[in-house]
Amino acid sequence: MPAFTGVWELIARSGIVNAVLFPPPSTVAVAILEWIRTGQFFGDLMASLSRVAGGFAVGAAGGIVLGVLTGRVRLVSSLLSPLFHILRPIPPIAFVPIVILWFGLSETGKLFLVVWGVFFTVWLATHIGVQKVDHGLIRAAQMLGTPQPQMLWEIVLLGALPYVTVGLRTAVSISFYTLVAAELAGSFAGIVYRIEIAQQNMQTGQVMGGLAALGLLSFVADRSFAILAERAVWWR
């Protein structure tokens, strides 16, 4: 990392590239410190994290519930799976114009975009995981008279949990990708909002500082989830 930063500094100050468009890391660091000094950084951080956390919670919960249903109930699968497979490839950023029309500049629209990105990832992982559960265990539980709710929790969902965990971890990163679309859909605070404002004012150091902050947040969230998942799903 220090070597990379040093090379970046030398190239940016050598005149080989335009320092306004490709500022050195020292300029980026000054921009980040100024961002923190003004107090805007923590407000932007909390705004972005609240959107990611809220969208992730709603999208993950919906994805798990419907993933179990489509994975276990053939009628539900025949009704919803084709629709979900059609909608799943549509990127959240494609919905920005219609979300602004539907929800205006409210937080509901931003939540919708993050939920959209998270939901399909978690749904697909859960759907596949449920279908991969050992049918012998399910038949044995049925023969022993296990109640359906208990079987769904102790056999189906726990059996699918390794797949669900992979989907959830992927969705953590996707929630930060979709945050870009969410904050482009008209916001007044947030890391991506600050990047957009800096870009309009040609403050490239601030732009790159915002990108660094976004990347660092995504990395920390991913690693934190990975550590928790390793402890929670120890049998995989």
Image (tube, helix red, strand yellow):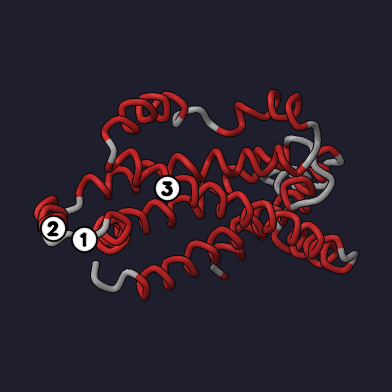
Q: Residues within 10 Å of mark 3 (few under 14, many from 20)?
A: some
Residue at the spot 87% in from the left edge and 68% down from the top edge? 37
Q: Amino acid at mark 3?
A: Val
- Write down the quadrant of residue 20 in the picture: top right
CA–CA distance in space, label 2 to label 1 = 11 Å
Residue drawn at x 27%, y 49% is 129
For this view, does 81 lie left or right of residue 55?
left
Element on which disc 2 rests: helix
Residue that mark 3 sits on = 65
Identify residue for label 2.
Answer: 137
Q: Nearer the viewer, residue 150 or 45?
A: 150
For this rendering, which residue is in front, 111 or 151?
Answer: 151
Comparing labels 2 and 1, the label whose residue is closer to the camera: 1
Q: Quadrant of the C terminus?
A: bottom left
Q: Is residue 27 visible?
A: yes
Precedes in sequence: disc 1 or disc 3: 3
Task: Point out which mark residue 146 bears.
Answer: 1
